[in-house]
Structure formats: C-alpha cells, structure tokens
Amino acid sequence: MATPIEMPKLSDTMEEGVLSAWLMDEGDQVSAGDILAQVETDKATMDLEAFDEGVLLKKVIDEGDSVPIGQLIAVIGEEGEDISDLLGGEDGDDSAAADAEAATDEAEEEAEDTPDTTEPSADTEEVVEEPSGDGQLRERTPEPVPAGTDAEGRRIKASPLARRIAQEHDVDLARVDGSGPEGRIVRRDVEARIEEGEPAPPPEREERAPEPAPQPTAEAPTYELPDDEAPYASEDISQMRKTIARRLAQSKYSAPHFYLTVDIDVEDAVALREDLNELAEEQGRAKISFNDLITKSCALALKDHPYVNAAYLPDEGEIRKYNRVHMGIAVAIDEGLITPVVRDADRKGLTEIARETRELAERARSRDLEPEEFEGATFTTSNLGMFGIEEFTAIINPPNSAILAIGEIRDTPVVEDGEVVPGKRMKVTLSCDHRVVDGATGAQFLDSVRSYLEEPMNLLL
C-alpha cells in the first residue's frame, strides 16, 4: 500500500519548510532510515528520514518549494502501484481535468449563457419593417448572423468565460486550440494563447491634422542611474526570517514589555577572567569569555527568582515556573538570529559552559543544530557589546518572561572614596513581561546578577 510522505514539523516554531535538496530519485528503492531529502526550517537544515520501505514513486514538490506542515511532498509504495488517489488526480486523465475546468467556466459564466432580453441576441429573430413595391410596409425576418464562427462559417466550441477573456484581449478563437471535451476551448487555452503573444488587430487609420511642432521648454534636470547600478536589490524572505518576524511581533504586541537597566562594576570580573584564561591556556582547556560569566551569573540568579525563569501560557491558563534553568544564548547568523540552549547552566562550571557555548554557536552558524539544541530555553541573553553597543533593549523570546540585553564593557572614570579613579563598567537591560514579572521582581533579579559579577569568586563555588 502506498505511503504518503508529508512535510513534518521539525521544530516547535516551524509552520512551513523549504525542500532544499532531494537526495533520492523517483524509482529508487527506499529502506527505513534512508534520507530522502534535506528540509530547511526556520532554525536549521535537517534531514528528512523515511520510516517505511518501498520505491520512491513520486516527488510531488520540487527543490526550492516552500510548503506548510502536513502537505504531501512524496509517495512511497510498490513499483507500478496506482497512487492517483493520493495525488488528488494530479496524474489522472487530462480530459477529466479539462471537463472539470469547462464545467467551472460555465458555472462562473452561467449568466452569460442567458440571452439579454433588452437587446436582440444572436439566437433571437428580429422583425424589420421595410417598404414594398406597392408602397406598403412588409415584415421581413433578416437572416441570423452567426456568432462565434470561423472563416468557413463553422461554429467554434468555447466556454462563455473563454469567449469573454478572448474578447477582452482581442484573441481570435479560430486560432486557439481547445483542450476541453470534443476540442472545446476553455479558459486556460485562451490564457495560454495570450501568454504566447496573440497579436492584436492593427488599429484603424485615422486622418489627423498635423500637430504643431513642440516649442522648446526648460526641463528640470533628471538623474539617471548608471546602466550597471540597479535602484534596489531584492531577496526572498527566508524561513528563519519569517519566523523571527512572526514570533517577535507576536511577543512585542501581546506581552506588555517594560525595561530595567543597571550599570555594573565589572573590574573584578574582568581580572578573574584573565586569571582563569591563563590557567586554561596552561592546561589546554577552553578559554572563558565574559559572556560565559554572565551566563553563569544569570543561571544562579534565576534559581532565586522563579518568576523570571517562567512563562505566561494563556492557552493553558497558567504561569509555569520552571525548576530547571536552560539558558538561551542569542547567536547572530547570516539569515537572522538563533538561540542555542545551554541546559542546566546553574549546575555547570564556567569551563563547561564556555566549551558548550562555543560548540553550539559554531553549529548554529553552519545551520547544523538539532531541534533539542535550540528549543526549550527558559531565559535568554543577547550580547551586542562586541559591536560597541553600550546599551539596548531586546524583545522577549516567547514564551520566556524576560530577556537580558548586554552592552559593552567601558573604561570610564568612577568615584571611589571621594576620588575619581579609572573603572570598568557594563550596562545590562532586562526586558520583562509585566504579566509575569513585576517591577520589584525584575529589580531584585538584576541585583542578584550584579552581586555575582561584582563579587565573581562566588561563581566558582
């Protein structure tokens, strides 16, 4: 029995997928576990695996096609098996399809088949009075004018809709080949003729008086682009960009955002990182970035502030406070943004967080992440400090209740004990969903994060 292969849901945010490449051809033998194709989702390019055995009877969509979840993309079955019922008549009799289209044309234009009673039609006899030789008026019925006939007077079979389209586009039906039943011309036949370039009849010549010669006028200067410079460049919207637009717009317009910013003294944290990286280099371990220190600080603080490590779920009618801390780390890639997840970050050391974050970021940039590696974050951080951004606000990654935006580390004068001394500062901004996180709750969470970064030895305990 033939088995339909449909577009699977390969991520929690996926609504449609692009079949980027077929890896098997029609007629190939397929075994369970074979990779049929590669599918581009909103987060990664993933393999489409077969779960049944048989022959790849039909590839329904082409490479590059985008289809929604659940739509048919291929059929597997026994060689020679009839699959027309699965294809919905796609490979059925062409005449049946033409019959259906002709019927649709007639249904759409049923009114056009009904003669207009206000004017004589081609099928209605018109009585004309004309003078006879004796001066009396005689009634005469003129010969009917044949409508829709070719040059030899034969009637052209065409649907009413096809006739109307042909008239609107000056198409000679006598030059159109019909694909409907018994050679009947249907809408698609006329449209095909229009696409081929049916020449319009030459316009009638009209005697015109010669126009006066144009008088020279002062014209405004115009700017023309060079031949090799187009006014703009366009590109298709990727699946990732579609998902980013949809989810962040939904978050921004449905979650009431408010923002809290603190300026943190990170001089001791910078010094600790330098010491740890000297040891890491001697021992051949992964070096620690400042973002790793922030990840660990947030993970520990979330354990003490469960409403920040939560989600507002109106469909379930609940606020879900998570018992585990899964940190989403925003990573910029060419197509947009993706958030690989460091799971149980509060239970991992700085070296493990550093190694795992780098591996996930590299795989994210190559679009090689598995769904479990970018789904399920309970809190997210976004760092633009490496681009020189001092401060910004981020949009919450749904269904999280908050996201932390991290600015650059600044060398700046600070006042200590009444004296101005050089210092290192960093601004972070917490975006909060006010349906879950109140102002005091968000402020207390930021205070905990600041405490860990200003006394960084606590991150090693």
Image (cartoon, rainbow, N blue to C red):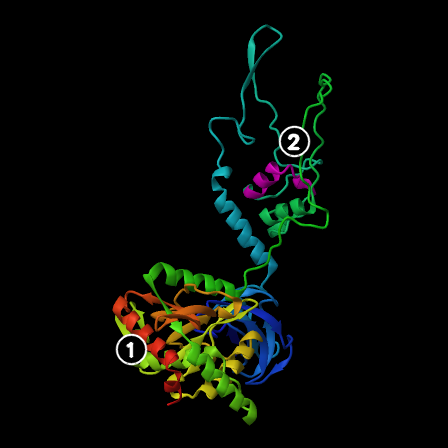
Give percent across and percent down for residue 319: 27, 72
Q: Indicate the quadrant where residue 348 lies.
A: bottom left
| Residue with the mark numbered 2 | 220
x%, y% of residue 369? 52, 78
Residue 59 in percent (x, y) is at 60, 71
Q: Residue at x 53, y 54 (%)?
A: 100
Residue range highlighted in magenta = 161-175
Which numbered disc covers residue 143?
Answer: none
Dot 2: what SS? loop
Question: For the residue marked with disc 2, what is the amino acid?
Answer: Ala
Considering depth in this image, is 131 or 340 the residue closer to the camera?
340
Q: Quadrant of residue 442?
A: bottom left
The secondary element bearing badge 1 is classed as loop
Q: Mark 1 or mark 2, which is nearer the start of the sequence? A: 2
**Residue 162 in magenta stretch:** yes
Q: CA distance from mark 2 to mark 1?
A: 67 Å
- Report crowding for label 1: few under 14, some 14 to 19, many 20 or more residues within 10 A (C-alpha): some
